[in-house]
Structures are given as structure tokens and as C-alpha cells.
Amino acid sequence: MEAKDIVAVTGEAGLFTVKTNGTKGVFVESLSDQRVKFIPAMDPRVLPLEHFTVITNEDSVELYDVFHSMAEKETETPVVEPNSANDALRTYFSAVLPDYDEARVYISDIKKIVKWYAILKEKKLLPKKEKKKDE
């Protein structure tokens, strides 16, 4: 399974994988409970995770880069529970992504990122970090 096959569906909890993609819509399967849902093609609710970014003070960072940072720092900074206190969530996220924009990255965003990370880690779907070639 590739990173482009993992999607979020607006209004639905958790993450999904794309099972089949057709002209009338897409079938997605929940990573949590393997339920399959049909999303009509005209419905813009299916968003690939590879398109998500986190806003920083300078620019933005791809969500998968945040996941890699979480994985790299997990031994020194254990991942907090998504239902932790707001201060604990912000402290944790500051350790993972020090320059994130605290005014535009909400607690609900941090909770969702922590939940998604746990799902991907449990299913062993965290993509490997690709080394960029010098051109």
C-alpha cells in the first residue's frame, strides 16, 4: 500500500484506504474496523494524507514529515494520548515540530495528528522517509 492510498474522509473519524476508484465514486475501507463506505465522485470529502500540511511560522511542513519527526523523537519524547490536557498536547507538539504556528494549529488538529499517527504505526503503514537526491 502506498501513501497516496491512505485518505481522510471529512466527517468520519479515523483513516481509510482507497479500495476501488471509479467514475461514479470511490470505495474506502476504514483502517480501524475494516468497514467499507462508498463516497460519490462529486463529494469532495476524500482527502489523501499526502496532501496535508502543518503550518509553521515560516512555511508549512508535510504531514508525513511530522509523522517521521514523531517516530524519530519517540524514545526521548513519548507520544501523548490524544485525550491529554491541552497543555500537554501543545508541549508535545512543540517538541516534535518546534516552529509550528500555535495560532493556526488548533488543539483539535494536534489530537487528530496524534490519533492518525497511532493508527498508522499500529498498522505498520508509516511510510519510510525518502532521501532526496541532490540535483
Image (cartoon, rainbow, N blue to C red):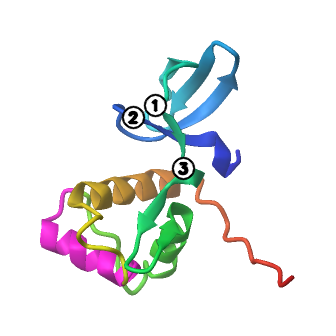
Q: Residue 88, image x and y in percent?
A: 18, 73
Span of residues in magenta? 83-98
Give the Cα separation between the discs numbered 3 and 2.
Answer: 12 Å
Which comes sooner in the sequence, label 1 or label 2?
A: 2
In the rendered structure, find residue 75 and report the number of the disc placed on it.
none
Upstream in sequence: badge 3 or badge 2: 2
Residue highlighted by disc 2: 10
Local crowd size for mark 1, using a 10 Å CA cut-off: few (<14), some (14–19), many (≥20): some
Which residue is under mark 3?
A: 49
Describe residue 67's horizontal placement relative to residue 135 as left or right.
left
The quadrant where residue 54 appears = bottom left
Q: Residue at x 83, y 84 (%)?
A: 134
Pinpoint residue 58: horizontal percent, then vertical percent.
43, 80
Amino acid type, mark 2: Thr
Determine crowd level at label 3: few under 14, some 14-19, many 20+ residues with C-alpha closer than 10 A.
some
Distance of mark 1 from mark 2, alpha carbons?
A: 5 Å
Residue that appears at 49% across and 22% down: 43
- What residue lies at 54% left-to-right and 72% top-to-bottom? 68
Q: Amino acid at mark 1?
A: Arg
Disc 3 + disc 1, Cβ < 8 Å? no
Name the foreground residue: 50 vs 31.
50
**Residue 25 position by quadrant:** top right
| Callout 2: SS | loop
Please tell me whether mark 3 or mark 1 is closer to you in this view: 1
**Relative to 40, is 109 above or below?**
below
Q: Residue furthest right?
A: 135
In the displayed structure, does residue 101 sit left or right of residue 74?
left
Is 58 colored magenta in this rendering?
no
In-image side of 18 versus 29 (left or right) = right
